[in-house]
Image: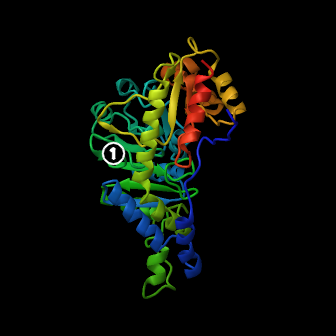
Amino acid sequence: MTKRIIQISQPCLGEEEWQAVREPLFSGWVTQGPKVKAFEQEFAARHGVQHALAVSNCTTALHLALLAAGVGPGDEVLVPAFTWVATANAVLYCGGTPVFVDVDPVTFNIDASKIKDKLSARTKAIIPVHLFGLCADMDAVKNALPKHVKIVEDGACAAGAGYKGVPAGALGDLGCFSFHPRKSVTTGEGGMITTNDEALAQHVDVLRNHGASVSEEQRHKGPRPYILPEFEVMGFNYRMTDIQGAVGLVQIKKLDQYIDERQQWAAWYNERFANIPWIRTPRYGSEYKHGWQSYVLFIDEEKAPLKRNDIMEQLQQKGISTRPGTHAVHMLKFYADKYNLKPSDFPGAEAANNHSMSIPLHNRMSEDDYAYVAEAIHSLS
């Protein structure tokens, strides 16, 4: 094989996005404004929600969503033990305590059967993560919860995904999304909060803009732009720029095309790896619409020719970027020390941490690129 360089992910950006940023650049309106509003409207329509509010990234989305859900000091929030660290960090930003719940090592999502054991009188919310673009089993999650517990979806990887015909972001009280370059659609950095609750939407809208009673656009375009707004609460500067909004407006219209292409190649990978006994390919039921932010394998090291990390090293030498799926947060030093946690406390997350492997799947790859990746993995057997 002639060596190729294949990144784990590459944003799919081009002339259309380049032209889209010209309008805010030349208009002079580069902070949150009309392009962000148009992007929000398109995102809300695609995800079947009444409200979508753009923010600076998904971490700030989680922070604001939890605050809007009423999370504060003394409250507990249930969090999957296998997720990106920001999911748990956002709880701490609110003064709350993340309570880890183990995950199903087959789907990598929260194990709903473990939820009830983690509930307490202080449980205020739960953050089911739709990891790698696969929605959590939301019926099982809801059935395990008291009615008062708020559901904040971490859909960082799940733009365009769905569960039983309902889009991600419309499955809980609030949803949070990421537009980081590793996601299917990107604005560089950026995030979105979705909800069907008018009061929650208004709360988030105020919090993302310093706590101001009206937005900058409303003030500047109003009859008295020289009058500063009232600030009744402490807020944050978590706004998205109109430059990002212009890119997002182009990207969101390509979302379903991108997912369809990824679905095609994920199915191709599944077929190519079906006969390798040490690989478990992604598994999920027909009630799920996978968003395919990542294609993540589970490596059975008892059957594999090499350890997971050695496999990743071999593929790196061939020019193929790989990553662990993500990390078990309870195994990270900060959380392990803070809460006196051991890896074995959450065996599903520990297994996912040690045996998951994400391989390239993105919209900049060619047929030859996919063939190269598959052949390189087969050559290890």
Q: Identify the residue at the far front of this view.
A: 1
How many C-alpha atoms fall within 10 Å of the one at disc 1: few (<14), some, or many (≥20)? many
Quadrant location, the C terminus: top right
Decide: is 123 above or below 212: above
Name the image quarter holding residue 49. bottom left
Quadrant location, the N terminus: top right
**Total of numbered circles in the picture?**
1
Instruction: Specify whether residue 108 is in view.
Output: no
Q: Residue at x 41, y 69 (%)?
A: 38
The residue pinned by badge 1 equals: 172
Q: Judging from the image, what secondary structure is the residue with disc 1 in? A: loop
Instruction: Specify whether residue 280 is in view.
Output: yes
380 vs 59, nearest the viewer: 380
Q: Identify the residue at the far top of this view.
A: 302
131 vs 72, nearest the viewer: 131
Classify residue 137 as left or right of residue 182: left
Classify residue 83 as left or right of residue 195: right
Image coords of residue 173 (percent x, y): 33, 48
Q: Residue at x 48, y 73 (%)?
A: 33
Q: Identify the residue at the far bottom of this view.
A: 223
Q: Identify the residue at the far right of this view.
A: 317
Q: How did the renderer colour the structure?
A: rainbow
Image coords of residue 108 (percent x, y): 46, 29
Decide: is 29 above or below 196: below
Image coords of residue 204 (percent x, y): 42, 59
Q: Residue at x 40, y 46 (%)?
A: 260
Q: Residue at x 56, y 51 (%)?
A: 180
Name the image quarter holding residue 317. top right
Identify the amino acid type marked 1.
Gly
